[in-house]
Image (cartoon, helix red, strand yellow):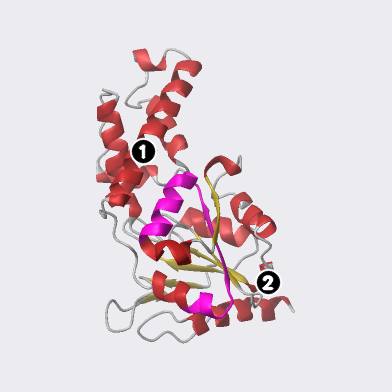
Amino acid sequence: MKNGYGIIFDCDGVLADTEKHGHLPAFNLAFKQLELPVQWSVEEYAVLLEIGGGKERLRSLFAENGALANTKWSASSEDQDNLITKLHLQKTSNYVEIVKQGAVPARSGVKRLVSEASQKGWSFAVASTSAEVSVRAILAHVLGPELSASFAVFAGDIVSKKKPAPDIYQLAVTKGEFDSERTIAIEDSGIGSRAAIAAGLPCLVTVSTFTEQDDFTDAALVVSSLGDPGAEHSRVLSNPSKVTIEDCVSLSAIKELIDAKLAQGS
């Protein structure tokens, strides 16, 4: 039986360390497969992550000083749109295969937390700018078939305005029938946390490879990871809510974050 509490996860960088080990090599392989003179470095990709959405990042190739600006691939906006569509489809196929090969490491604490919360009647969703097929591949990889089946997925182009706009979280709350006063978002990036907070949700941040220096103003809690007892410990980076965190972020700590936000509004 559901208890009214919920968690809406971002996907990339939250469920697994996908950007460096999954998306970046998938993009670069797609460039090679389509014989384009482009390869993104780790440093270049870190900057591109300020742009929400894979198709939107690809569009930067045609911007002034972009790798494909003023080339045969940028002759018209239609040519650009067609290439972006082909690239993104190829990249998504590459990414799913990389995930199936087990090359993308899961973030610590995610399966522990979802397992416990599931037993206590919590509801779950993912709100992500990634393609739905990519999100579902990661869910299955990190959580297995039974736990991943309990997730509603809101992803890709389902909203016109991507993070940091709040639209994807607003849609997840409405369509997923979450109680916004008893739901928390878990994010890893500045643009993601701003989206969740703008949607009225408290936000727990687990920083990832590219995001530790992001601005997490107004996040309820910022940690290095959710952590797992006896394995990777959670390091607290910011705790304005003053919840108790020991070796890992517990379900009781997450409930405390939600209840603190609820008390502020009462």
Disc 2 or 1, which lies upstream in sequence?
1
Residue found 40% across the figure and 58% down from its top: 140
Q: Are marks 2 and 1 in contact (CB under 8 Å)?
A: no
Q: Nearer the viewer, residue 111 or 213?
A: 111
Q: Which residue bears the numbered disc 2? A: 181
Mark 2, Cα crowd under 10 Å, few <14 / some 14-19 / many 20+, is some
Indicate left or right for 30 with 55 as reference: left
Where are the magenta residues, as a range?
116-141
Under circle 1, the secondary element is helix
Q: Nearer the viewer, residue 141 or 49?
A: 141
Residue 120 on the magenta span: yes
Which residue reaches farthest right? Answer: 266
Instruction: Tell me which corner region of the image, top left, top right, bottom left or bottom right, holds residue 55.
Output: top left
Indicate left or right for 166 with 39 as reference: right
Callout in the foreground (2, 1): 1
Q: Which residue bears the numbered disc 1? A: 93
Residue 168's spot in the image, x, y percent? 60, 51
The amino acid at mark 1 is Ser
Residue found 49% across the figure and 18% down from its top: 77
User: In 3D space, how far apart are the residues under numbered discs 2 and 1 (Cα atoms)?
Assistant: 37 Å
Residue 153's spot in the image, x, y percent? 54, 54
Residue 175's spot in the image, x, y percent? 67, 55
Residue 51's spot in the image, x, y percent? 45, 43
**Residue 207 in view of the camera:** no
> Tag on residue 257?
none
